[in-house]
Image: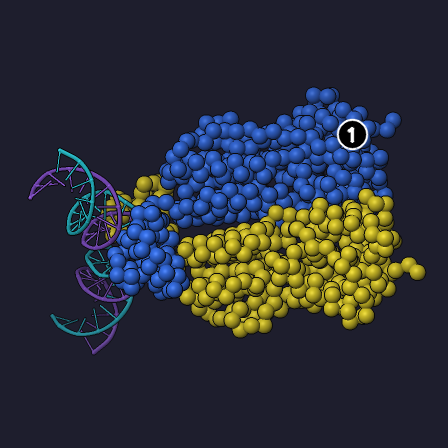
Chain colours: A yellow, B blue, C cyan, D purple
Amino acid sequence: MTTIKGVAKIAGVSTATVSRVINEPNKVRSETRDRVISIMRAHHFVADGLAGSLASQRSRTIGLIIPTIANSIYALSTQAIQRASQAAGYTVLVGISDFSAKVEEALIHRLIERRVDGLILTGADRNEEIYRKIAHNNVPFVVTWQLTRSREQPTISFDNYQAARTATEHLISLGHGRIGLICGRTEVNDRAFERRRAYEECLDRHGINIEPDYIHECEFEMFEGRTAMSRMIALESPPTAVFCANDIQAVGAIAACHDANLRVPNDISIIGFDDLPIAQCTIPPLTTVRVPANEMGNRAAVALIAAIRGKSGIKTLELPTELILRNSTARLKQ
Amino acid sequence: MTTIKGVAKIAGVSTATVSRVINEPNKVRSETRDRVISIMRAHHFVADGLAGSLASQRSRTIGLIIPTIANSIYALSTQAIQRASQAAGYTVLVGISDFSAKVEEALIHRLIERRVDGLILTGADRNEEIYRKIAHNNVPFVVTWQLTRSREQPTISFDNYQAARTATEHLISLGHGRIGLICGRTEVNDRAFERRRAYEECLDRHGINIEPDYIHECEFEMFEGRTAMSRMIALESPPTAVFCANDIQAVGAIAACHDANLRVPNDISIIGFDDLPIAQCTIPPLTTVRVPANEMGNRAAVALIAAIRGKSGIKTLELPTELILRNSTARLKQ
DNA sequence: TCTGCCCATGTAAGTGCGTACATGCGCCCC
DNA sequence: GGGGCGCATGTACGCACTTACATGGGCAGA
């Protein structure tokens, strides 16, 4: 396989010149440059980025940890991160943790091994030791999907608590008092935790009893949302409105209502969370909370890359969410 | 930052021993090993994988090229590939081409630069020059999502043509003669091309005229499917059945029918393609063709890694698809 | 003509690890 | 008691680049 040395020999120049042709082409006389380039092309030469990164001490790679990518909102932010990174000449290494702290720790180790120039993390809730390892290896990072005010954890995110509160308040403002919750597993997912906390505190503030049978934590799948909803419908006194803390589960919940011949929103109101594209195509269209996944991903990547380049530290940034009113919620019928 | 050398000095051993502790722990006396490990831990030492890969000539990384990840079936196969790779100790580098041949070429170059041990490609239709570059750099690869019988391009996929034919035949067997098609852009997507070809040849075989107004190529988004469907509904003589060559566009198509007060399947039949989780939660549940995204991804990764380890070449493998009958298609009413 | 500077290029010292080979020690067996 | 073997470890080279510094020629200004 051709190396920079081989190209240099054929072109009758030094390896330094070939390296310059690749990295700083304008520092090479155009005649020399063209000769080297045509030789590289003829030999299908691809420079070894590993050796380059080792020598230059930067890999032009950023690491991204997400819990899941199929069927989920994380695909959107991931795509935005990919786009922004590619545009800046960076490659993204994605690690999928499957909501497992153990797996996440191993993935972060692997990414540091690969000498990523920076890390984008999902959620803020992890072992102190991991943060220490990241710091010891001088890897700048940014937390997404979860707002922290801590100086030690620069964050680019929206506020899950406030957003979930908005959703809950919306249902209450429509006169609902029997309100259910379907959300992710709070013990492995600090975003779900915040959303549940908002739901509970919000009911509490309005003097509404928290009914354990109205709360379902489950996996990030449509059918799980569907099952949870079916269970609630089967209750003696079922809720009249349900807050689904993500649109995926909301789609399942709507299907469950349809299964049970309940009309949404006439018989039961459903509000989602995320504003995935699917939210516009459910029947009825889903009222939900729009989350700035795309902008968050883009800004996180841009900020991280700026930090890598030493232009600035990362400033914590809170992005707005927005209640999107469609047709899956209605005033409670007396 | 700590290196293997630093650890060695502190532990009073050579760098070779530290390296062995990392890579072949059983070759080191347990006493020495434990001492070295505790020193590594105390210093948050993470070995430099770039240097390691450079020295060992393998990166334990595989590259994956997909056109898009948000809102799509590719997320499923990607997740499967990630899982299988992580399990085998490999990291996945994902490049998103956005259906652009130019971007794809640049991404493949970048992946080879990163010295991926192997490549997983989506679709088979690309410049000869690219395949030559891959070959010249000794990178094993496998094509997914598109079956080719060529020896030069080992493939692990299902047959898009046959699968799309099954879908079209299904509609015809229900008595439909005015059949529409919504699919991806065939000039940038050989999977869409095959599916359209199957649709057209199938109609032809049954003596059904191909009506240009019944064919819509559009982007991979729900709202695009919705728009396409609306246009067809507005025709003087609209189709009585529509084959959507992916479930995403089918979801949009169903929404468009609902917008127009057309009942699915009573007034119009819709069949999808992919069998995404959403297909079970549409109203009505979507008849579709199940595509083995998960198994394909898993098998592609496993086969590629086996090839990397020199255990075997990659044998082309055709996976089965399956017509999934739900409730979005019905016999044509006379 | 000489000095000094700039441009194009070369020289060579890293970059952090893997690994083939060398070393040295202890033990077994003859 | 010596040869040989195996285990634990060390030595040192190589991996393919980047880059600080050196070199040398040409040219402008003194």
Residue shown at 72% from the left, 55% from the top: A216
Q: Quadrant of residue B173?
A: top right
* Above or below: residue A122 compared with residue A252: below
Image x and y of residue A205, in percent? 78, 71
Image x and y of residue C6, in percent? 29, 67
Q: Amino acid at mark 1?
A: Arg
Task: Specify the quadrant that holds the C terminus of chain B.
Answer: top right
Taking the image as drawn, is residue B231 in sight?
no
Taking the image as drawn, is residue A249 in sight?
yes
Q: A57 or A200, which is in the foreground?
A: A200
* Above or below: residue A140 compared with residue A250: below
Image x and y of residue A150, in percent? 56, 72
Image x and y of residue B314, in percent? 45, 31
In the picture, measured across the screen, residue A29 lies left or right of residue B292, that is: left
Residue shown at 32% from the left, 52% from the top: B30
In the picture, measured across the screen, residue A16 lies left or right of residue A240, that is: left
Q: Chain of mark 1?
A: B
In the picture, measured across the screen, residue B17 lies left or right of residue B257, that is: left
Q: Secondary structure at mark 1?
A: loop
Q: Quadrant of residue A316?
A: bottom right
Q: B123 or B129, which is in the foreground?
A: B123
Among all residues in the image, which is located at the extreme right? A334
Residue shown at 85% from the left, 53% from the top: A236
* Above or below: residue A169 compared with residue B155: below
User: Can you identify the residue that label 1 sits on?
Assistant: B178
